[in-house]
Every structure is written in C-alpha cells, then in structure tokens.
Image (tube, rainbow, N blue to C red):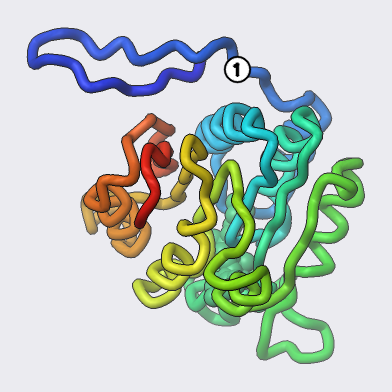
Amino acid sequence: MWKVRTQVPQGEEDVGEDVGAVREPAPEVLAAFEAARGFMPRDEGLALHAAAVEAAGLGLPLLEIGSYCGRSTLLLADAARAAGTVVVTVDHHRGSEEQQPGQEYSDPELVDPERPERMDTLPHFRRTLAASGLEAHVVAAVGASPVVARAFGGNGGGLFGLVFVDGGHTEEHARADYDSWVPALAVGGLLAIHDVFPDPADGGQAPYHVWTRALASGAFAEVGGERSLRVLRRVAPGH
Ligand SMILES: C[S@@+](CC[C@H](N)C(=O)[O-])C[C@H]1O[C@@H](n2cnc3c(N)ncnc32)[C@H](O)[C@@H]1O
C-alpha cells in the first residue's frame, strides 16, 4: 500500500493517507530490473515504481535524470505504459565522477571499446530496454542534463508528472538538475530523489541538500519513500 504522510498532532499515530493499492511491476519487468546493472535496490525500486504509478495518473510524461544502464528506467517505463504515457530519461552516458575508470563505482565492462579512458553506458541501456519490450514507452535524451533541459524549451519546458533525480551526485550537478527540471514538475506531481543521506557517514550530501531545498521552498510536502529514495509532492508552484 502506498501511503502519503500527513501532518499529525504530537502523540498521535501517523497512519498516512491511503491512496489505494499499489500495482506491482509486471513480473517480467521486475525480472529485467533485477538482472540490469545499476544502483537501485529492489525495495527502493518498488517505492519508485509506486510513486511513478501514482504520478502517471496525471496523464503527463515522467522524467528521469540518470538513465545509466536502464535499471530504474524499466520501472518508470512500466508505470508509464500502464497509464498510456512515456518516460523521458536524460543521461550523457559518460558516467558520473565516481563511475569513471579507476574510481569507486567504476565497472570495467562499461568502458567505451574505442576509448577505454571513458565510459559508454548507452549500448547497455539500449539492450536493457530492447529486451524488456518497453522501448516504445521510453524517450532517451542523450546529453548533459542542463543542456537537454534548455533544448526542451527553457528551464525544463513542458510539464512532467514525476521528476526523478538520480544524475550527477556532486553539489554542482545535483543543483543544476534541480534548477533545470523541477520548474517543469506539475502541481500535484511527485519529486523523487535517490541517495538522500541525512547522515554524511552514510553517503554524499548533494541529494540530501536537494531534498532539504525542496522542502524549504514551501512548494513541496513529504510523501514518503523507502530508505534513501525520498518522495515529495508538489503542492504549489515555485522551487
Ligand atoms: C547513479 S547513475 C544513475 C543510476 C540509475 N538511475 C539506476 O538506478 O540504475 C547516474 C547517471 O547520471 C549520469 N550523469 C551524471 N551527471 C550528468 C549530467 N550532468 N548530465 C547527464 N547525465 C549525467 C551518469 O552518466 C550516470 O549514468
């Protein structure tokens, strides 16, 4: 069950707002998700899928920043397919700083065969999506996130029902993703942010700073999520 957190007086139990039974991803999509390379654990993935199913009910496209090899994209595409919409997913496919050859999260199988000093996740992304049967529900934008946002028509352009932030995890990139895409999130839509770690001992702080900034803006209310996957609802314009 997908629960929306509500403000409750001190001492009373927060039972959340029950917004209905959550449709699980199709079994073959869940299997493809489990098999795909990526950084999204199953429990956080299911929470992302639940958010995407709800947000897709707005009838607007969903947006992902950080396609990588398509793991989380599969879940968003499953939700988009069920609602008759699409997911737009943005990535330059050259990897984040920490994924570069020799860095903590590098994967030697993802280097560009013609240029081993750089990464290329695009062929892997293509294969993941093609094998899942979800290709028709995915629009892949290959480029730097702020550049794609500008090309979409000025600071994000059209409206999305969900914005999922999982691109570069430096302060600079996370801030640019927020500035570029959050203005394009419809009122009532959901903002999902991955790798939100309030305690610096658990991980980098940039996604956490995006989350605190959204809450401080007054335009968002916390909805829930799962561990480091946090979900907020846009309740007013602004960012
Ligand atoms: C953490 S991975 C995404 C993981 C994916 N969502 C998953 O669950 O498997 C981050 C991705 O963001 C991309 N990225 C980082 N900075 C970017 C930027 N400024 N513009 C576009 N893509 C970027 C990287 O290429 C990388 O594929």
Left or right? Give the position of 136 relative to 119.
right
Residue 183: image location, x then y, percent:
47, 58
Residue 193 position (above or below residue 49): below
Q: Quadrant of the image for the C terminus?
A: bottom left
Classify the position of ligand 1 by quadrant: top left, top right, bottom left or bottom right. bottom right
Front-lying residue, 96 or 156: 156
Q: For residue 4, what is the image quadrant?
A: top left
Q: For residue 18, what is the image quadrant?
A: top left
Q: Give the residue displayed 33% in from the left and 46% down from the top.
A: 219
Q: Which residue is mark 1?
A: 22
Q: Is residue 106 visible?
A: no
Residue 206: image location, x then y, percent:
33, 64
Q: The residue under label 1 is which amino acid type?
A: Val
Q: Is residue 156 visible?
A: yes
Q: Give the residue displayed 39% in from the left and 14% down from the top.
A: 17
Front-lying residue, 40 or 15: 15
